[in-house]
Image (cartoon, rainbow, N blue to C red):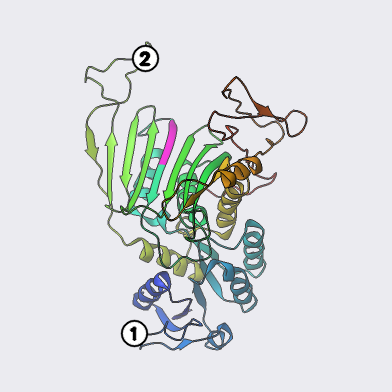
Amino acid sequence: MSELRAAVCGLGTMGRHHARVLAALPGVRLVGACDPDPGAGSGMTDVPVLPELDRLLELDPDLCVVAAPTLAHGSIGRRLAAAGVHALIEKPLAADAEEARMLAAAFERAGLVGCVGHIERFNPVVRAMRERIGGGQVGTVLQITTSRQGPYPQRIRDVGVVLDLASHDIDLTRWIAGAPYVKVSAVTSRMTGASGHEDLAAVVGVLRDGTVVNHLVNWLSPVKRRLVTVTGELGCLRGDLLGGTLWFHGSGAGAGLPDRGDGDRLPGGEAVRCELVAQEPLRAELEGFVAAVRGHAGVTADLVPMWAGAEVMDVTAAILAEPAAVVEVSASGGSIDERLRREAVREAVVPAPPRADQAVAAGTEGGLSAAVTSPGDLVAWSPGGLPTLVAGYVPMPGSRRWF
């Protein structure tokens, strides 16, 4: 296979970046793109921009990047698999986890490369974090926290912040920790009259190895932030994914810090800036995809397989299906509609899965108030009326390990 024929489906902001990088990769020729919007191809004079996928397939591409709206990923992916075209589909992989697994199975049966565009795995900061954690720099990992916030993206219409933003952090957290989620829950907020989906989420979870994780996501903030902090028994790694910086805070040996009574000093000490290998994440991602299509050995570490995208969607589905609370907020800045809030709270009573840990807390005016939804299920309520039960999520038996 000398020159690979590449195509792009969807020419929004991300699709145009994919087209730019693919056109510049050695041994790759961008033969065309498709988008139903007549104005999507403006400025792209070097390749034909077609309105339909069928016409794009007539150009006989070897590989295709799908950057179309999420709800179209399933149908586009199935058609590419049937046509024998290797595909990288932007995250979220599909409309739901079941459809994501169907896509993964379709590409696997066809013997094609099928991967998902979780680009943060290719961020130099995230890669350096994973290497340093694997090398034991922070010791046993205790907590991973992420903050992904910024203004409302005009390009997003069909999903909320959990699928659009939190999916990034769920994937990179699993990847750098090397352990899947076993429990997750969230409180979400939706601005009435805004996107129609959740615009803010605070997620808490636990990984199989006991690591506690927290994700804060929103597209309501005027300040854009992409932060990841990994805290371990020997120190802390603090990464800024936008600024491209990574700092390590060591244990503070010799800094006069108190110990825990066993001779080990508590974390602290001065910060040391870590050296990073500069690279454009999107180029690194597409180079790995192209190398896999060419059949190069040892490239699997530079791919995010579709099965990985499906398991990320298991976690996002659990967050969206069983939130600890959903809060409605008036987009005009008015007070919370108490009726909507009470209805959301009642709907949020979620029984814990069998044998899962149950978080039960007391505290209403006048004492403990609880609702029993079925034998053995107990949901405690706080004074503010929001449930304190953390909804459980346990991977399905036989779930693939992909880290």
Q: Residues within 10 Å of mark 1 (few under 14, many from 20)?
A: few
- Tell me the element at label 2: loop
Say if the magenta span includes residue 263. no
Q: Farthest residue toward the top?
A: 261
- Tell me the element at label 1: loop
Residue 125 location (% of width, % of height): 33, 49
Q: Check disc 1 and give the amino acid type.
A: Gly
Residue 38 location (% of width, % of height): 46, 86
Q: In the image shown, does 208 or 327 lie closer to the viewer? A: 327
* Residue drawn 29% across the image and 15% down it: 258
> Which residue carries the number 1 mark?
43
Residue 68 location (% of width, % of height): 51, 72
Which residues are drawn in magenta? 141-145
* Residue drawn 38% across the image and 64% down it: 282
> Which residue carries the number 2 mark?
260
Q: Quadrant of residue 183?
A: top right
Residue 350 shows up from this direction: yes
Does residue 25 sit above or below 49 in this rendering?
Answer: above
Give the mark toward the camera: 1 or 2.
1
Q: Is residue 374 left or right of residue 44?
A: right
Q: Quadrant of residue 48?
A: bottom left
